Image (spheres, rainbow, N blue to C red):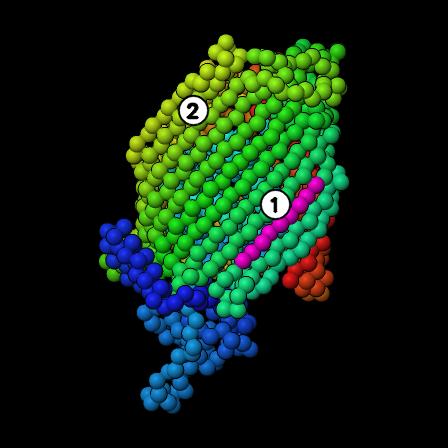
Amino acid sequence: MSLKQFSLIAAAPSHCRRALARAIQLALVVGFSGAAVVPLHAQQATGYAIDAGPLAAALNRFAQQSGVSIAADASKLQGLSTEGLVGDYGIDEGFARLLQGTGYAARTTAAGYVLVDAPPVKEATHREPQALPAINVTATREKEATTEGSASYTTPATGAPTRMALSLRQTPQSISVIGRQQIEDQHLITLTEVLRQTPGIVADTLDERVSFSSRGFDLSTMVDGVPTLSFNTVAGASNMVSTSIYDRVEVIRGPAGLLNGVGSPGGAINLVRKRPTSDFSGHLSVGAGSWNRYSIEADIGGAINAAGTLRARLVASHSDGDSFIKAKQRREDVFYGIVEADIADNTMLSAGFEYQRTDIDGANFGQSPLFYADGSRTHLSRSYNSSAAWSTWNMTTRRTFVNLEHRFYNGWKVKADASYSDNERERYSADLWLYPASINASSPLGVVQVANNPAESGNTAFDVYASGPYQLFGREHLATVGFNINHYDFRYGNDSAVANAFDRQAVNIHALDTITRPDFTYPLNRFGGQTEEQAAYAATRMSLSTPLSLLVGARLTWYSNDTWRRLWTNGTNGSRVTTATTRENAVFTPYVGLVYDISHDYSLYASYTSIFQPNTVQNSNGEILDPQRGNNAEFGIKGEHWGGRLNTSAAIFKTQQDNVPIADGLSQDGTVAYRAVKGANTKGFELTASGEVFKGMQLMAGYSYNAKRDRTDTLLNPNYPTRMLRVAGSYQLPGSWSRLTVGGSVSYQSSIYYDESYGLGRAYQGGVTILGLMSRYTFNPHWSAMLNVENLGDKHYFSGLGGYNGYSYGNPRNTWMKLNYQF
């Protein structure tokens, strides 16, 4: 990326730009109590690893790593090179080394650094340096976090946990970033596939839904750092999210309470969208794979006016194909568009739209049966479909968003983000009913439930925050303060072909298609509600000394949840009844972390946070469980090697929690019911590494252990593995073989088991290791071809166990080939 790609050139009249800047500055001063912020160009030594090469690229990388601003005319740097910068340097010394022999020098100004003519030594006392025609350039750690085009399996910075762009090493919490390069290399086309390569994450298949958990607890979801509730019910399915529109997926393990006050103690998933590029670029690709699958994708972006102040990007994809499961087909259409406009000096307005439609025929609600009624195992084939071929599960998501960002010359910025999303599910089916397990082993006769089960939801989210540096006691610190609001409403229900009763029919489990699709004339139930969350948050990272930093933050949350139901199966003829009302006011969620640099490469850290999460699930009586409350402590060591090209970490943690929901049969609406467990705790450890291990070798690896137990030391989630190993990597061969990149993945999980709900027996699976392979050949700078192989050993294994008193099989061995044109 060149310096031009960071240019912000104002198109609005100067008086408008000045008025807008003054208005935003006034809002910042009034809203945040007049806190004084003073620009600082810290001169403490920082480690750099900038290769020799073009000067413009080297300066861009230096600006990104150091967090300073540079003003320069990029056209005058063409053809100039530098010997690079490796080692520990202050800002001024780093500039001097990079610019040595180029004829230029760096001079500091109130707005940052500017490149000037370097005077000859003899004339240094007689002439003033002449500044080059300047372009405002803002290159910060936040910009560098973009993974697209980096060829790396790591990122030097993230703001997902704190709103402050910190390196992974300086973030006192466990976090993994799955970037664009890994997504492309390993063919991770959905969020499910991404999280199955993320260290410490369990992706458990229920049916067409997949639940995500860390350390035994579910994960919350954010989009571009803003919490969203749009996936909180069956109307939205985060596991189906296409990765084609995202630059990276950031996964926080452990409570993310600062930005997610009602978030899960497991952590949060942050989906970071692709942004427009300054230069025209993009790609076209076509792919084909096992089970008659194919796809086509286009991704195009760049400046759309001569000045470069207006930029856009469009992503569109279509895929279709069968599955290893009998009569199951899946089609998907994705569209994403975004426009960015520089409307004033350092002020950018962005707006965009996302659309995803996923249609699944032969879709499953629930799982395949584990046992016959006599307690013997079913041993069905991997291709067995527990639903009729005409069953559907069609999901549509639309999301509109707009954000406004202004950057001040003193390093502060203010950003406001607003979005609205709506989700719809169309679902009608005939599914095997496993409550209770009543399949006759000799017949084999079972029961199917035939129903129409639509759902819809809407979510409005707004977030505004300010962040930047400030000076106190002679040192530079960082701070962030903000406010967000989420309003979510949902509706779902069931319709039947039988009045006032569920339509359940006896059928041979190997002849489900003998059940024909009826007209769903009679309403059975309706459920709905709305949730509103408002929160104010603030945090600061204080540099207590050169090696020691303290991160302190807090969140105040106001939460309300109202639910209602209508039932036609209990003689009330669909009368609306309020089922639960929850109110929580000014819930205080603290966060504290310490980071101590013990060497150039390593830091020790410790963090503590409290947990507050209202439950939205019901017990068997239809009552909402009390909110979850608890705390989490984590200790570890992190490493940052070779200028951030490789990040490592080791952590131990303990989470204590009350009112943890554990599956306990069915609720009144036919979904899973839960019971609340007091005194649940999770203990464990994690080891991770991500980035360039050696030249050409990119790696994402992690080993984790955790076990969630109750007060009697009973394992609460025996169907989740306690030990997991996740490794994915790619290696670009050297020399004359450099056009070829090879790699793959290894996924291991320890044994799991599930005790059937009605006492028929225990289903057990030993440890499982799944291997994947990849290779890519680059013909020239434009054309490349790729091959991916999943489950190389063709292992039979459960991808989900016990979610609906049954099981789901993982994918058999399959291949995917893709041809890509880059421009």
Closer to us: 363 or 67: 363
- Magenta residues (range): 312-320
Is residue 318 found inside the magenta-colored segment of the image? yes
Sequence-wise, the earlier of marks 2 and 1 is 1
Residue located 68% across and 53% down the image: 285
Which residue does the image show at 44% across and 73% down from the upper left? 72
- Residue 474 in view of the camera: yes
Residue occupying image coordinates x 34% and y 52%: 466
**Majority secondary structure of magenta residues:** strand
Residue 783 at x, y = what percent? 70, 60
* Residue at the spot 61% in from the left edge and 39% down from the top edge: 357
Left or right of 629: which side holds 272?
Answer: right
Q: Residue 554 at x, y = what percent? A: 32, 41
How many residues crowd mark 2 within 10 Å: few (<14), some (14–19), many (20+)? Answer: many
- Per the image, the residue denoted by label 1 is 334
Looking at numbered disc 2 in the image, what kind of residue is underneath it?
Thr
| Residue 713 visible | no
Whether residue 706 appears in magenta in the rendering, the answer is no
Q: Which residue is mark 2?
A: 563
Q: Is residue 163 above or below residue 600?
A: above
Circle 2: element type? strand
Query: Disc 2 and disc 1: Cα gap in Å?
Result: 32 Å
